[in-house]
Image (spheres, rainbow, N blue to C red):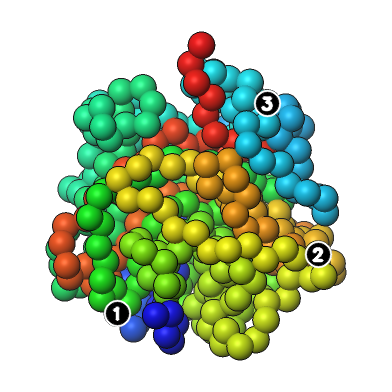
Amino acid sequence: MRGIRRIRHPVAAALLAVSACGGGESDGNGAGRASGGADASGGTTASGGSGGTNASGGSAGTAGAGSGGGGTSGSGPLPEGATGIAAKYAADAGIGSDSAVVFADDFEGAAVVVDLRAKWDVVFDETTLGISTDPGNVNGGTKAVEMLFRLDSGEVGNGLMKQLLEERDLLFLRFYEKFEAGFDVTGAGSFHNGGSISAHYHVDGQSTPGVPADGLNKFLVSYEATVYSDGPPPGDLIAYVYHPEQRDNYGDIFYPTGEVSPNTSLPGNFGPDFVARPNVAPILGKWQCYELMVKANTPGQRDGRIGLWLDGRLIADFPNLRFRDVESLKIDVLSIGGYISPNQVRDNEIWFDDVVAATSYIGPKTPAN
């Protein structure tokens, strides 16, 4: 049952929470470090909460005006299916050169975990990350990232974070993710997974869980499965959101149905054009295509928007949002990863592959040839 929602750890630092947020009912005082670039802005705290590492802004590249038939995130219908940037690049070959793409990694260039640093500014935890070459655990090509979450009565996390060289008002993040068959986080009070897009969520190299968004300081959106649902493991897919109208110190959960937690008796403020959709859960043991869109609002207007796609199908669309009150608050970080606290049933694994970030809809990979 959904019950009372008390998440104490946001998708930490662009690590989608990952290792970065701290455990239990507080932020923790551990001092872990994540391996990334040299000291600069945009890092994330490592496992334990407060003692993060500073990550450098890497080689995200810059984007042009956008391309392809992916459409935009305006007030009209959002695109679906194989109509985005990926439709122009069979098996994603060459997709990183598209003028709308700001970041791409299929992990084919990584032989060992340390090689991930070439494209990602934070790589955590190198002791439980791996480069999978098992054909059953790669989505395309010959490699994928493997994240192991060991059985532990405390917190466990992994993640990869990228800081954008150019801050943005709009970003699409597509990634492939696979939860292992038998994945089980029963009893976890805090569980994050998937991908996130954030704006100034990291201050002086540390994530800021438990600090509410106020329209001036930050916002964050994570596309993830939640244990606070009635769906089968790993839980229904939702948007986990730090925004100025959040109902608690920690992020709100936006369900595709329009329900918002905490205080689910209060409807979400998604405007008259909101379309409620049924909740849906990922399929364990199967690669699936996830895509997250975050459009920052025009200050003074409620034209912000979140879109969630699964395998090219729009499963949630949240319009009429307010993320910011000043133009200077822009998207600066994306991440993939996971965080479980406590992980008390078994070792769990998640795989990621074929990550692309762009300024227009990307869509699922198209077949080779």
Where residue 42 sits in the image (x, y, percent)? Answer: 49, 54
Chain-order first, disc 1 or disc 2:
1
Kindly identify the residue that appears in the image at 82 percent across and 50 percent down. Answer: 76
Say what secondary structure mark 3 lies in: loop
Q: How far apart in space, not on screen, are marks 1 and 2 (Cα)?
A: 38 Å
Dot 2 amino acid type:
Asp
Residue 197 is at least partly visible in this image: yes
Residue at the top extreme of this rendering: 369
Kindly identify the residue that appears in the image at 64 percent across and 54 percent down. Answer: 307
Residue 98 horizontal side relative to residue 117, left or right: right
Q: How far apart in space, not on screen, are marks 3 and 2 (Cα)?
A: 32 Å
150 is higher (above) or lower (below) than 10: above
Quadrant the N terminus occupies: bottom left
Residue at numbered disc 1: 24
Residue at numbered disc 2: 273
Label 2 Cα crowd, 10 Å radius (few <14 / some 14-19 / many 20+):
few
> How many circles with numbers are drawn on the protein?
3
Where residue 359 sits in the image (x, y, percent)? Answer: 68, 39
Say what secondary structure mark 2 lies in: loop
44 is higher (above) or lower (below) than 323: above
Chain-order first, disc 3 or disc 2:
3
Give residue 100's quadrant in the image: top right
Residue at numbered disc 3: 99
Checking the image for residue 269, the label placed there is none
Dot 1 amino acid type:
Gly
Residue 159 horizontal side relative to residue 265, left or right: left
